[in-house]
Image (cartoon, rainbow, N blue to C red):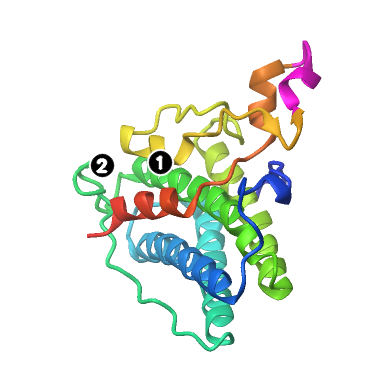
Amino acid sequence: MADLRRASSPLPSATPGRASGGPVDVLAALQLLLQVEYLQSALYTRTKAATGLVPATDTTVYDTLATHADQHLVAVTGMITTRTALPAPSPVFDFTVKGAFPGFAFAAGQYPALQIMSQIVEDLGVRAYLGQLAALASDKVALNTALAILTVKGRHASEVRRLRGTQGWITGNSRGDLPLFAQAVYDGEENVQQGTVNVASLAGQFGATVGATQAFDEPLTTAQVTTILSLFVA
């Protein structure tokens, strides 16, 4: 898989104005991330079960995505149960996105549609994890686990983009050629202010604003992630 990993926003600015959470906030963050893992695991489980969907040249990549998704799901579930809480159940997912992505049925010949869906859910995963880091900061075990998962998700997001022949990073808040429903995954990525530094002003003639938006992933809030996830729930 691609070795490129996109830089992420520094922890202090990951969730502006939000202090480190206590045990209740930690569990709420983990439950939200669990829903993200359910979504990704469901996507790749259905992909592996499909016949004639993924070409032989890319089977290893999608098998790896599926394995990692299952491992991340187990890890997040375990973090919840070891904190004496019950993991929330998985919803049933609709990968036609309630008709916003019509016709996608994991069928033979639909590999381009699968690639689009993979890019959307992987980019969502990166930003969702970033948005929960501050809430996890008081629990070092949970924080370190989330950070380790985040680095892998960054590589996944880069790889599925490159399979589509696009750049391995997000530019501004552009969703590129993705369907309209995906825009919420990219809103806010145009930010160039990292902490007290305007990164665009440092880039000068070397990309300036465009380069500054590419160099950092931006967090999504709990409310934003919840809204996006609701699009996929049957």
Is 216 a magenta residue? no
Lateral position of residue 66 relative to residue 22, left or right:
left
Name the spot of residue 55 as percent of width and height, x first: 44, 49
Name the spot of residue 74 as percent of width and height, x first: 54, 77
Picture layout, residue 176 above or below residue 207: below
Asked whether the beta carbons under mark 2 and mark 1 sit within 8 Å of each other, the answer is yes
Lateral position of residue 14 relative to residue 91, left or right:
right
The residue under the point 20% across, 44% down is 103
Q: CA distance from mark 2 to mark 1?
A: 10 Å
Q: Nearer the viewer, residue 228 or 179?
A: 228
The residue under the point 35% across, 50% down is 227
Helix or strand or loop: what does disc 1 sit on? helix
The residue under the point 66% across, 62% down is 20
Q: Earlier in the sequence, mark 2 or mark 1?
A: 2
Q: Callout 1 environment at 10 Å: few (<14), some (14 to 19), or many (20+)?
A: some
Amino acid at dot 2: Phe
Name the spot of residue 234 as percent of width and height, x first: 22, 60
The residue under the point 47% across, 70% down is 31
Amino acid at dot 1: Ile
What residue sits right under mark 1 in the picture? Answer: 116
Q: Nearer the viewer, residue 88 or 104?
A: 88
Q: Which residues are magenta?
A: 198-206
Q: Which numbered dot is residue 101?
A: 2
